[in-house]
Amino acid sequence: MKPMTYQEAGVDVRGEPEALKRLTEVLKPTANFLPVGKLALGIGYFAAVVQITDELAIAISTDGVGTKLLVAEMLDKYDTVGIDCVAMNVNDVLCVGATPAIFVDYLAVEKLNPDVIEQIAFGLAEGAKQAGVAIVGGELAQIREMIRRVEEGKGFDLVGTCVGLVHPQKIIVGQNLQRGDIVVGLASNGIHSNGLTLARRIFFDIAKWSPSQFVPEFGCAVGEELLKPTRIYVKPVLELMKQIPVKALIHITGGGFLNLLRVQTPCEFVINSLPEIPPIFAVIQKLGQVPNEEMFKTFNMGVGFCVVVAPEDADKTVAILRSQGEQAQIIGHINRVGERKLWFTEQGLTFLPSG
């Protein structure tokens, strides 16, 4: 069998840098249309930031759940994907040092089903509770001609937007990173909401498993494992920021560990002490014969969020996060500044920025 990759599964990311470049070039001048304030952070970070006054800036991020929704449709289980929708956005807003505050959603359906919509709403409400945000509005659209699934009437898409608050002087984008700074990783809850196209292709097309297939390594059905909601890191990280001068915050989401390279300071990250990789990733890799390199640039591999702190703050950082219920540990450090590079010593993998 040919080794499976994200590209083989139907997601070709090779054109993304050029597409984003063109998109940015066209949209960048619209910053001049701001009626108040100024742009503090633009495209390229986890969230955009607009400074409103000397004391207040707002951070904004928008994202969806992706093809994880197809698994929800397979299982006819919709009460967790709302958590994912909130998580993908609040975790990104958190990455610029902002406190997530307001959330709106966009729900597009093939066919209106109040029972399904209520289940989705339960998940959104639970995500809001975990993140401490208010869902103040949204949009419900019926677009049968645009959304179709194998089973008629079940198609839907779910997207959200989060607004956070931050003092302009407290924006965090890894602007002062130094050699020796420590990377602390916070555990994920499995696959989260990224790489689902590859995972689904392997489980359901190659292995021919049904969503209800019990997998001993997971202790549950494969569909249940895939639907475990993305973890929300807002409250423990905000508590950490009250006590420690955090230098960078990184959501390990689409693109896997390559997200570490999105910090402002060009630097080389050395990752040399990862926690035990959750079983789902080992099973995906074995069934699909997925190369190590593909795994680490597609999935979170058990680490859903990272914080970078000074060496003298590392042990206290881990202690604070653990006191907040997080599985946290030191996973690496910054080896040098000046060049963007990511090196996994145990796996013998090296990554440079794409594009």
Image (cartoon, rainbow, N blue to C red):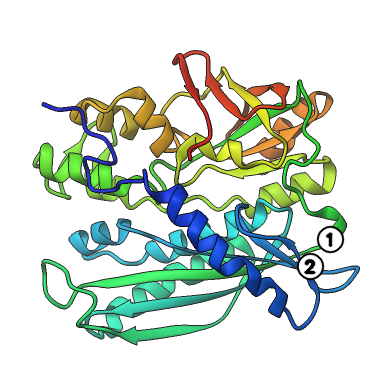
Q: Which mark is residue 180?
A: none
- Left or right: 135 as drawn, with respect to 173: left
Q: Residue at x 83, y 54 (%)?
A: 170
* Residue 278 visible in the shown view: no
Against 123, residue 98 (above or below) is: above
Residue for badge 2: 57
Is 253 or 343 nearer to us in this picture?
Answer: 343
x, y percent for residue 320: 74, 37
Tag 1: amino acid:
Pro
Quadrant holding the N terminus: top left
Mark 1: few, some, or many residues within 10 Å (few <14, many ≥20)?
many
Q: Residue at x 52, y 29 (%)?
A: 352
The first of marks 1 and 2 along the sequence is 2
Q: Residue at x 71, y 75 (%)?
A: 32
Which residue is situated farthest in the right direction here? 54
Question: Is there a contact, CB below 8 Å, between mark 1 and mark 2?
Answer: yes
Mark 2: few, some, or many residues within 10 Å (few <14, many ≥20)?
many
x, y percent for residue 185: 60, 33
- Left or right: 174 as drawn, with respect to 161: right
Against 94, residue 216 (above or below) is: above
Against 220, residue 124 (above or below) is: below
x, y percent for residue 270: 61, 21
Residue for badge 1: 168
Element under label 1?
helix
Tag 2: amino acid:
Ala
